[in-house]
Amino acid sequence: MANKKKPGLLHKLLSILLYPLLWLEERTSLPGRSGLVGGIKYFLFRRVPGDISWGHTLGSAAFTAFIVQAVTGVILAMYYQPDPDSAYESIRHITDDLTLGWLVRGMHRWGASVFIILLFLHMGRVFLYGAYKYPRELNWIIGVLILVLGMMEGFFGYLLPWDQTAYWATVVGVNLQATGPFLGPFLGPILQGGTEIGQDTLARFYSLHMLVLPGALAGLIGLHLWLVVRVGVTSPPWSAEPAGRARPGPPPPPRSGLVAPGPRGARKR
Amino acid sequence: MNPRRNVDPHGGHGTPHEPTPTIWPVGFAIGIACIFIGLILSPIVVAVGAVLAAIFGFLWIRDVTKGIRTVTEPAAEEPEPAPAPIPAGTRPAGPEPGEGEVIRYPRSKFLEAATLGLGGLIGVVVTAPVLGFTILPPFVKQGHPKVDVGAIEDFPENQYVIATYLLRPEEGEVSRRTAYIRNNGLLDDVPSFTILSNRCVHLGCPVQVNGLPIDEDAQTQVSEGQRVTRIPTAAAAGFGCPCHGGQYDNEGNRTAGPPVRALDRYEFEINNGRLLLGDTYSVSEVDGTGAEAQIHAYPLSGPGQHVDGPEGLLYPVQPPR
């Protein structure tokens, strides 16, 4: 700004285009603190270790799979009827009659498996890199809850096509859980809304599948991401580079990691 | 991996509460594994596993809490001289009686407690009925009327007949039930029937007759809005489940596969020569055959649940049916 130059047309155009973002930022920020736009920028452009690999993208991939499930699920819910007399027919209608219905249903059906597979791969990466250790134990626990809820999504969603496979697989699944000691005999009826699978079961499973569990999952995923940003991304175990954000003080000595563990006393500095 | 590099351990939070390194979880895991293996192999292995898990679990907890215990001990000595006289002019936050001062409960405290208390109360008032509505319906009004499956003469002696009907016709096909009914003839001038439920007592799949159903001779009867179909079978050789291969003999005793007891049976009554099916009950095993059979009956339990033996203790209470 030392030599005053007339701003170019491009610059003007850009500032007009970006004005809504400035408007938003000004109204969501406190003095000296970033607002909504700054927060999103911080989330997207935060510091990560230099030697992360494709393995570190598995969490984002699983998150993407969840978003695909959420979007396709919402669209499917526009056509699906959770009623014992019409559920199967409405699924057939989605698959055979509606334009691209087969594709969206296929995305939801196969995306469910993709989501679970990616969860496991992500979990494996975190485990093998030791990324679950202090101070990230809480995020591991939240991740396990996400995995459990994801599998429950699979269980409750499996009944919805309401064909013979879905019906009997759910009979077996519910009875399996009802064999749990002490409370098992009560868990079965609570799950199916009666002593046997009946007219209330389908709507109950549908509500759990598309309202309760996705809500809980979204909340836990939000918490999971918040903690990832808060404590930073871990370096690979062989890395000499500090991870995440800058830390004050002298850099830590390079460590030998998994290849040649240092003496035990070395951990306590 | 030393993740402490990633977060400044001395930044603001003081020293990190990192758990002390310990080897005992390995022993604990071995103990748990022994328990599970013992469930299949032998109770002795279970006992050994339980002892191992208890010992190593104790050692693990002792190791993990060592840091906390050593830290808190000197800290506990500090508050000894704490109850020093309150300097004049400063009023404590709580209702502390001062000299000549009226005991007061601060307004802010009261409002805080009232807001939290009322909020909690409203939460309970709203949540309780919703929770009840979620959980209770499966346990109340689960009864159903008795189903007339035909006259006694419709069931030839010593031959299984498949009877299938809708338990609650207004609910549609989802309430379809199937019973295997055998007329055992008369016992002390009283008609005797063996009526088995078709739900496998492994995990609830539909058990099939090991023998051909004679579909040509099927009869359908409609009475009081109830439609019952009777299909005779040719020389049933017990029953088999298509899901996981459970096998039962003609009395419903388990002969092979994963089921944990004999097939459930229907209570029945005979009214004006008509056979009426009631509720089902569970059976651990049946001694003898036909009308002479001794049935070890128990209240209805879900599939896969033991009714007798040590495993039966795992299911002490059954929900109301």
Image (tube, coloured by chain):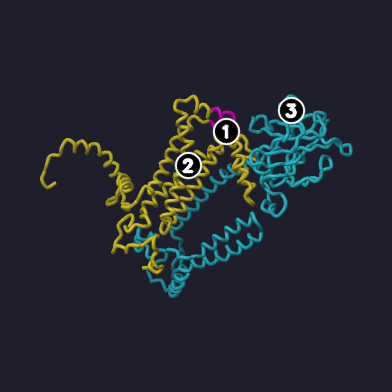
Amino acid type, callout 3: Ile
Disc 3: which residue: B214
Q: Residue at x 56, y 38 (%)?
A: A204
Instruction: Tell me residue B227's x, y (percent).
Output: 71, 27
Disc 2: which residue: A214
Q: Are marks 3 and 2 on the same chain?
A: no
**Label 2: few (<14), some or many (≥20) within 10 Å?**
some
Q: Chain of mark 1?
A: A
Instruction: Tell me residue A107's x, y (percent).
Output: 45, 34
Give the overall secondary structure of the magenta segment.
Answer: loop
Quadrant containing the C terminus of chain B is: top right
Label 1's element?
loop
Q: Quadrant of residue B247?
A: top right
Which chain shows up in yellow? Answer: A
Which chain shows up in cyan? Answer: B
Vertical placement of B321 versus A260: above or below? Answer: above
Q: Quadrant of residue B132?
A: top right
Q: Nearer the viewer, residue B300 or B320?
A: B300
* Mark 1 or 3: the one toward you: 3
Inter-mark Cα distance, 3 to 2: 49 Å
Inter-mark Cα distance, 1 to 3: 29 Å
- Boundaries of the magenta span: A81-89
Q: Chain of mark 2?
A: A
